[in-house]
Image (tube, coloured by chain):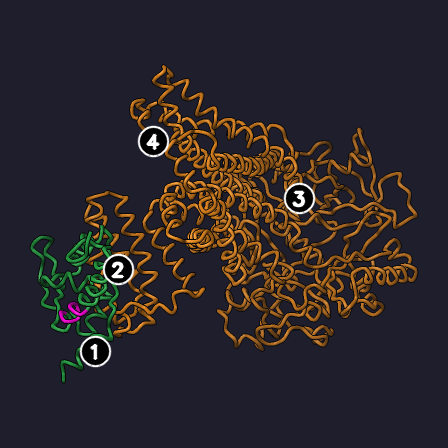
Amino acid sequence: MKRKTSISEQIYRTLLGIYPHNFRQEFGGDMAQLFRDQCLERKAGRGWAGLARVWVQALFDLALQAPLEHFQAPNGKNLRQPKRSSGDSMISKISQDIRYAFRTLARSPAFTLVATLSLALGIGANSAIFSVVNGVLLDPLPFSEPDRLALVFSAFPDQDASHRSVSPLDLKDWKEQNQAFESMGGFPSVDSSGQVLTGEGEPQELATCYVTEGFFETLGVTPVRGRFLLPEDHVQGRNRSVVLSYSFWQNQFGGDPAVVGRSLRLGGEPFEVTGIMPRRFEFPNAETDIWVPESIIPESGIPRRRYIRWLYVVARLKPGVTFEQANQDMLRVTGSLARQYPADNEGLTAANIEPMHDILVRNRRTTLVVLFITVGFVLLIACANVANLALSRSDKKLREIAVRSALGAGRRRIVSQLLTESLVLGVLGGIGGLLLGLAGVRLLADLNPWDITSLAEIGIDLKVLGFTFLISILTGVLFGLAPALRSAFSDIRQALQEMGRSAGQAGPGLLYRRFLVVVQVGLVTVVAVAAGLTIGSYRQLHQVDPGFDAQDVMTMRINAPGYKYQGDQTKDYYQRLIEAVQEMPQVEQAGIVRPLPLGPRTFMGEGWSYLPEGGQEEDPSKLPQANIRWVSPGYFQAIGIPILSGRDYEEEEMDAVVINQSMADLHWPGQDPTGRQLKLLNQWKSVVGVVGNVRQMGFEREGQPTIYVHYQQNWRRGMTLVVRGSAPPQPLLQAVQQRIWEIDPDQPITEVLSMQSILDDSFSRPRATVLLLGLFAALALLLSAVGIYGTLSYLVQRRTHEIGVRISLGARLPDILKLVVGQGMILSLLGVALGLAGAVAATRFMSSLLFEVSATEPSVFAAVALVLLSVAALASYLPGRRASAIDPIQALRYE
Amino acid sequence: MQNEAAAQDLQSLLPLKPLVFQILLVLHDGERHGYSIVKQLAQESSGRQIAPGNLYRTLRTMMAQGLIEESDSRPDPLLDDERRRYFCLTSLGRRLASAEAARLEDLLSSARRRSLLSGSGGAR
């Protein structure tokens, strides 16, 4: 016993810190001592309730006295009663009401604690989610005037293609010929090899973004140090300039400002660091380490042809120009270019302009909105509970209110006093909620489920504080208004009589409570349905066969650096690499691929035109496009992609291709395509094998045609090594790395990931949504159960007399249960029915989050109804049992 | 002369806040420590317990005005062995208590004359 209060005492002593230093020095010890004495006395007398009372009183005391001590001097004025003159002003009334509210709340510590906790939970959840919504959806992008920014794509309207990349030559002409945009810039749309940094410790491949002129100007960001790339930095011969990202600068150079102006060795050549980007600038993604001029990529790397399209374009509208006008303008520009260059640009007769903001938040918007609405419901349910509690309390206070009313307190005054009490409670709940919300945001930042890279920075800012304060007040009004009005306007005398009679009829109190229960259950139903649908969707996601076998497969990125291996040397290097790794005894099968399915740099593949056997030749704009992926023989076996017909590549096969199921179905449905011909890169090749479709990005297996091309048919860098091994992963990995370094000790090996972890990661976003929605649904369910329990307890209490009569007339447990549980179930059924109807309407707009699950999936609705009704039955059962244990003699005496 | 000035000072402090007057009364019987004051006050006013902050701020102000002072600190034989700070009235404090009591007496005799309170004087 003594130990517990000394923890209490410790906490109290810490809290005393809010007093001014001198006062604390002098009286701190005495106050702590007194507190301890009071705790001991109350605990001995009234147990935990007593301790709670002392704590509540002490907290209010702290809240009131400490600020006063800071501002008031200990002079004689404070010993005498204040003069009357300030007694009637509005401020003094309000402050009187607030003090009165504190006192009454302190006198019912149980109610205050439970109510504050319920509200804190509801408000806290809302705060946390609002913080995220605020940071992601509402906060401006880190660019200047972001609403004028857009991404511009090449569009081929006849081919239904609207988000194609742009070639540098087209970009140059667009810039010169358009009248809608004040600037444009390009960045890569394909996965490009990074520059290898040497001379700063181990060689590293940096995530590199190759940008054109105008990129930085268009985005409108100010570097934290130095400058970004200017037009002269892009000129051949003088383009060895680099801009660093904030995170790279911190991680590699510890934030040393002297880095600007230094020379870094990239790709074996010295580059000058011209500037550092600000922390929030993570464009095109958070992994980007450096930005360099795209002109450093040689012609042999990417030929600068008008039909080789590899850029995405950012553009800034001129002030006053609308997106619609820009669309029209680009129609003109692209049309004119298509006429000018019919061979290259046929069909490219429009540009697709998308506002930047939409693109960046598109995926997350629906999820966040759903979560936001869900926590709103949770708060409403919490409010209903508190309203219930407040109602019970106002019943008890009816007598006191009667007395005060008789003493002349006007109706309005009573209402305002009661309302103040609710507001104070709301604000207390809000403070608790703010703390919980902060903790919640920290938690979300650690989990970072939606790849919101600036989540770590999202915290409580002014908007969130304001939001929390607002909903605290609204909450207070919401649950406080009805009981306050009822207390003030019902005929006091009649109400007192009615209470004494315990007539059991549906007085206004009972009706209101029943209404609250129905509303609560309805809200819970909607929340539970939403949660159930996401759970179902998640299960469906897991059912999807990824198309490969992730077990026992390691992957790592081996990017043969450009300054070491040129042209065919790259192919030779990879060949040596594969052979060496394949020889290892622990390795079952090795292969290389680009891009790796679901990997960190995954994309669908390079887009090339091809011509299937028997297709029409002469119309280049009508040629179908396929995704091109580079593989080595043995890759399919390494990663476990099944060969459905035909065979894998053999070594050095230059006129063979392997296609995927989708392509086979597209051109040769129902037949075996092996042996058929396909024209790729102006060469006819033979289909030697068909492999299964895989999940390349996203959750569905691709439906697009894909050609897996032997890597020797051209050369590419940035390949990912895929190793299937029988050994445990860590030793296997080390052995493979060892082998690779035996061939070339300077080779950077990056992105070492097991295929299983890549697969797991692909579920992280929906997983987070499921967890959160599930948590909120459980919370809502708990709160509702408490609400049902409370209301039925009240009902039992009101009808004690009647129940006593029934028992004395022979009613047994089942009969009483039928009475009580019956009440509970009727209300719950009503609530569930309304909730299901509401869910049908509401969930349709979250259908974009659902995978293979309809927004009105009957099994989910049925399961939710079942669970809720069971919980309601349980919550009703407990008061019912208590009711049956009523001593009829006591009950008959109960007034 | 000094008495008049002192009396002037006292009047300026009236009417006293109820809590201050009650503390003066409780200490009138003898010195007490904080917890004992709180308990006695609770007894005399229907169980309401004063919180530490409120109490010690008031005590501090009373000390600053010279109405009470600290006596020595020693353990209370009825409680545990911890040393507790004891407070006692000063002569100024006693006089102030008397002055406030007199003021209240004046008020009450007015009420008694009008038969609001049973007591000496006034018809039933």
What colour is chain B? Answer: green
State which mark lies toward you, 3 or 4. 4
Residue tagged by mark 3?
A696
Identify the disc placed on residue A895: 4
The relative height of residue A53 versus residue B15 in the rendered view (above or below) is above
The relative height of residue A515 versus residue A555 in the rendered view (above or below) is above
Chain letter, colour orange: A
Instruction: Say which of A450 and A266 sits in front.
Output: A450
Q: Amino acid at mark 2?
A: Arg
Instruction: Say which of A469 and A185 sits in front.
Output: A469
Dot placed on the residue nearer the N-terminal end, 2 or 3: 2
Residue neighbourhood size for the residue with mark 1, other residues' Cα within 10 Å, grouped as few (<14), some (14–19), many (≥20): few
Alpha carbon separation for disc pair 1 and 2: 38 Å
Alpha carbon separation for disc pair 4 and 1: 57 Å
State which mark lies toward you, 2 or 3. 2
| Residue A836: in magenta span | no
Give the image location of residue B56, x and y in percent: 23, 64
Q: Amino acid at mark 1?
A: Asp
- Evaluate whether residue A41 shows in this view: yes
Q: Verify CB contact (< 8 Å) between mark 2 and mark 4.
A: no
Residue neighbourhood size for the residue with mark 3, other residues' Cα within 10 Å, grouped as few (<14), some (14–19), many (≥20): many
Q: Chain of mark 1?
A: B
Q: Chain of mark 4?
A: A
